[in-house]
Image (tube, rainbow, N blue to C red):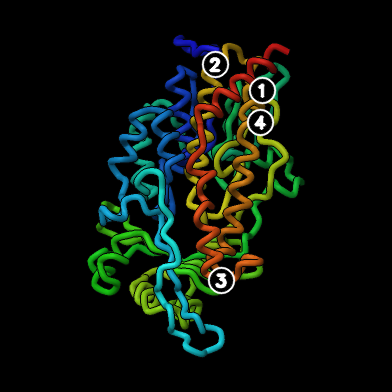
Amino acid sequence: MTTNNTTKSFDVAVVGGGIAGLCLTIGLLKHKIPVTLYESAAAFGEIGAGVALGTNAVNAMESIGPDVKAGFERVATFNQWESKNNIWFDFRRGVGHGAHSGADKDAGMGELIHSVQTPRPSAYVHRARFLDELVKLVPDSIAKFGKRLSDIENLSDGNVKLKFHDGTEAVHSAAIGCDGIKSRTRQVVLGENDPAAKAVFSGKYAYRGLIPMDQAAELLGDELARNSQMYLGYHGHVLTFPVEKGKTMNVVAFASKPSWDDPSWVVSTTKDDLRNDFAGWSSHVQSIITLMQKTDIWALFNHLPAKTYVRDRIAIIGDAAHATTPHQGSGAGMAIEDAYVLAEILGGVSSADHLHAAFKAFEQVRIERTHRLVTTSHACGQLYDFELNGVEDNVDKIAEDLRTRMDWIWNEDLEKEVAHAKAIFEKTSKL
């Protein structure tokens, strides 16, 4: 199967202008596939602060196009010490050995449990900055704003009709939902009554904050402030890493809760609540807590496994397909992988009649890997919070788990995935 260098005879609607939607759009344009990107907001924008992107994500960016990787590198921040370049996180005790019993409760606070090494330097970006770089690679004429999806209808001629809340409609050969964890496209693909159609609460919530690096270094010392750290404890953990070229320390403090009843996933709370959640933790964590200004908490939801990522000529990728908790730092990376693999498959499609077969080939090579991320990430949150069955607060067992936990994510052969998908497509498109 070869890529056609002329403009394709079919066109694609991409729903959602986040990292997944923009990376996919860039990939489709490379293959001369006419594409329209529909974004519900009035302009491109990302919420949230720092995001970690592993080796697999950088490899996928490079494969989508050198401009994508170059844009990422312009805004990426790495651990500030050269000796820490290939460290994902230094995992440390956030509580003392006797935190529960009261005996010797401060012993071991901050001690190193394990340093997880990465195949290439570990990078962190501010979501909004990375998005700005991706936007530069998409022509202005491609994006339509203020287009919040209400429904997608499969037409008798094989095309799809998108319906938006503003009353407008659009017809395309196919639609790909990149519309995030609250994806409307996912509900269309699975059916609204499917238990997996909407995200479920993961049992964790997070406080997020950005702290000026000079302040952080003054309180924590250079090593802990300027390089990525993870502090583990009972029913919570706190991570920090540098962003904005080392000018800022990004903080995410995780805590546990059995259920989430508020209709909003982001709610205001007080500094006292934050302090109470981490009372008795190490001096490092207490120092970080004192510097955090905002005390909003973000409920962490994820998807149950979807039975499919495809319905006729509608497909879902990224968080719309497999929203995960952030505990393995790989949600955005998997979305970029999805975008690369799907764009490569569609690049070899010559007729709109074969779009469904292309989508199914994508699903076949991606669904197991992406479902696995959701499952292992949930377990990883339990590992960090001394909740994982058979491990609990045994730091030797935690270290043993961490030694290989990320290997299957970072060491993926994406070119092999694409070749496999293309072979599946070649076979099924001829049936």
> In this figure, which residue is indicated by the disc labeled 4?
364
CB within 8 Å, label 3 to label 1: no
Quote the CA–CA distance across marks 4 and 3: 38 Å
> In this figure, which residue is indicated by the disc labeled 1?
356
Quote the CA–CA distance across marks 3 and 1: 49 Å
- Mark identifier at residue 394: 3
The residue carrying pointer 2 sits among few (fewer than 14), some (14 to 19) or many (20 or more) residues within 10 Å by Cα, namely some
Of the two numbered discs 4 and 3 on the same chain, state the one appearing first in sequence.
4
Quote the CA–CA distance across marks 2 and 3: 51 Å
User: Of the residues tagged 4 and 3, which is closer to the observer?
Assistant: 3
- Mark identifier at residue 153: none
The residue carrying pointer 1 sits among few (fewer than 14), some (14 to 19) or many (20 or more) residues within 10 Å by Cα, namely many
> In this figure, which residue is indicated by the disc labeled 2?
348
The residue carrying pointer 3 sits among few (fewer than 14), some (14 to 19) or many (20 or more) residues within 10 Å by Cα, namely few
Q: Amino acid at mark 1?
A: His
Q: Give the quadrant of residue 391.
A: bottom right
**Depth check, front residue: 174 or 421:** 421
User: Of the residues tagged 3 and 1, which is closer to the observer?
Assistant: 3
Residue 171 visible here: no
